Amino acid sequence: MDICYELDRRQRISGISGPWDHFALNNNGEAAQSHLVLGRSLWAFISDMETMDYLESIFSAVIRKGLPFRTTYSCRGPVADMTMRMCVSPAAHGGLRISNRVIAHHPVTCLNTAPRGVATANGTRCTICAAFRIGDEWIATGNRPLSSAFPRDGRTFCSECADLKRHSGHLPHMAREGWSTRLGHSL
């Protein structure tokens, strides 16, 4: 079942549906129960700047293009590591509807790493530069999301990175590093 929330045009949580409270309580999220988050900014609940910047880019593009965006990400909880599928869709009055579904659930053990074996971005995120695709358009981002939260599938390339590969016969060194020098990132 999908866990959904809606954001108004100021990116405040304006609606919640699905098993939101059940999910929050099962993941030590007492402070994230629906009655405590409604009306608050989504950004109050996201702790790292990379994810914040990446989501802001996605949200802006979804509103501008009027098309949904789907991706897969990792959600690390106190008792389980989960692979989640997220769909961001335009909603009325410049808002957004975000739905999330658990597609893999791995109990936490001392040996666990990020969940594996689940398709990642379904061809919506470039392996090299992290540009994301909405419809037929690739949209470059200024920041890469944390790879632990948004894993790459290793075989999806935006048109610009595909051209680099086609002309050189191999992927640029930056693909192994996971950073794009053309976006100004360095290690």
Image (tube, helix red, strand yellow):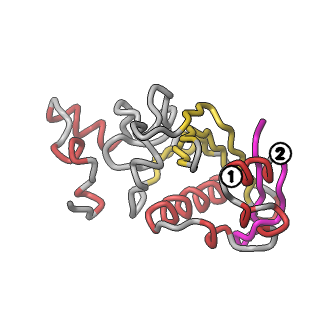
Of residues 49 and 160, which is closer to you in this image?
Answer: 49
The answer to whether residue 174 is above or below residue 34 is above
Of residues 156 and 134, which is closer to you in this image?
Answer: 156
The answer to whether residue 33 is above or below residue 137 is below
Residue located at (53% from left, 48% from top): 76
Residue 172, image x, y percentages: 18, 42
| Label 1: few (<14), some (14–19) or many (≥20) C-alpha neighbours in 10 Å | some
In the image, 108: left or right of 172? Answer: right
Please tell me whether residue 83 belongs to the stretch shown in magenta. no
Q: Quadrant of residue 125?
A: top left
Tell me whether the residue at label 1 lies in contact with that at label 2, contact meaning CB atoms closer than 8 angstroms. Answer: no
Tell me the kind of residue under disc 2. Gly
Residue 6, image x, y percentages: 78, 58
Q: Which residue is mark 2?
A: 18
Q: Secondary structure at mark 2?
A: loop
Residue located at (73% from left, 48% from top): 23
In the image, 138: left or right of 78? Answer: left
The answer to whether residue 61 is above or below residue 152 is below
Where does the N terminus fall, quadrant-wise? top right
| Label 2: few (<14), some (14–19) or many (≥20) C-alpha neighbours in 10 Å | some
Which residues fall within the magenta stretch? 1-17
Tell me the kind of residue under disc 1. Gly
Q: Earlier in the sequence, mark 1 or mark 2?
A: 2
Q: Secondary structure at mark 1?
A: loop
Of residues 27 and 89, which is closer to you in this image?
Answer: 27
Q: Which residue is mark 1?
A: 66
Kindly give the residue lying farthest to the top in the view shown: 117
Residue located at (63% from left, 73% from top): 44
Kindly give the residue lying farthest to the front in the view shown: 110
Residue 137, image x, y percentages: 50, 45
Real-space CA distance between mark 1 and mark 2, rounded to the nearest whole angstrom: 24 Å
